[in-house]
Image (cartoon, rainbow, N blue to C red):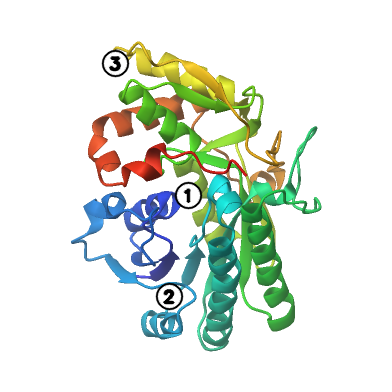
Amino acid sequence: MKKVIITGGLGFIGSNLIDLLISQNYYVINIDKVTYSSNFYNIKEHKNSKKYKFIKCDIKDKKLKKIIFKYKPVGIFNLAAETHVDRSIDSPESFIQSNIIGVFNLLECFKEFSKRYNSKLVHISTDEVYGDILSGRSAENYPYSPSSPYAASKAASDHLVSSYVRTYKIPAIITNCSNNFGPKQHPEKLIPKLIYNILNNKPLPIYGKGINSREWIYVKDHCEALLKIFRKGKVGEFYNIGSNKNLNNLQVSKELIKVSKNIIKLGKKVKIIFVKDRPGHDVRYALNSNKIKNKLGWFPRTNFRQGIKLTFDWYYKNTKYYKSLSKKDIVKRLGNG
């Protein structure tokens, strides 16, 4: 059984990727430092699996190298990152530590490891590195122009990985994905926060006028793209992963209300309210994902309406997920600047 390491596997995308890899008969070593956004609920079905092992470790730690050399993975998927833009506005330092210093340590470890063993590193990044895309779609050769400390830290990590490919010839690939949604996402993010409020008869807060547009992709589609890139992607390349489907925050909220009405009776307080916008809020992100479609034959399989129904169903049936989190992390407003 081939072994792979996932860093940040107690998080949203990481835990969904673990589900996919185990179903594909990989032995998964999950490395996570266990922060507020890590959740053991996300991997509860694998706890006793013979294909799964959890190790508590920060990717900045020296012991990371020992773990990699001990398990000799055929691949490492780096999803360990601080990801919440609002949180990066309030306290950027943890983003610099995880997303830059942590990636640097991982690269140093992998540089030594890949000299001796056949392996591949897939570094997972974001469309936010490109900044505001007011028209058209950003392809892989588009200039980076990050707006938030979060996006800047991810841009720096992408450049670091790319420099190690060029200078040290490490076998690594960088992916930039659009906004993910789906089961197991922390409710500091828009969709699970709105679902939490719907389920708890609270208003639905939307920044500004709700016009900020994002390209939305169902998390399982993203994970399938990552596996395809790991298996067939070209070392040293960047791959955008997106759905080509943009919705603004107001449209997302209205779609969620529509879906939830068919499943539960809505409380009287469930209505959209507009709140003060966050500083430096990008108006629009949009990716050109033609490269992964044309070169690797990957296409997203889940449209937004299907995905949002699956997502609402999961949270509705897994209310214990919310109970496993600190309430202040769900309801507290961050990023006022």
User: Who's the residue at 44% across and 65% down the image?
Assistant: 7
Looking at the rendered structure, which numbered label has been put on residue 264? 3
Looking at the rendered structure, which numbered label has been put on residue 207? none
- Where residue 215 appears, as percent x and y from the top left, is 62, 35
- Where residue 253 appears, as percent x and y from the top left, is 50, 22
Upstream in the sequence, badge 2 or badge 1? 2
* Residue that badge 2 annotates: 73
- The kind of residue tagged 3 is Ile
One can see residue 184 in this view: no
Crowding at dot 2, Cα within 10 Å, few <14 / some 14-19 / many 20+, comes out as many
Crowding at dot 1, Cα within 10 Å, few <14 / some 14-19 / many 20+, comes out as many
- Image-based side of 54 in relation to 281, left or right: left
Upstream in the sequence, badge 2 or badge 3? 2
- Where residue 188 appears, as percent x and y from the top left, is 45, 41
Q: CA distance from mark 2 to mark 3?
A: 45 Å
Q: CA distance from mark 2 to mark 1?
A: 18 Å
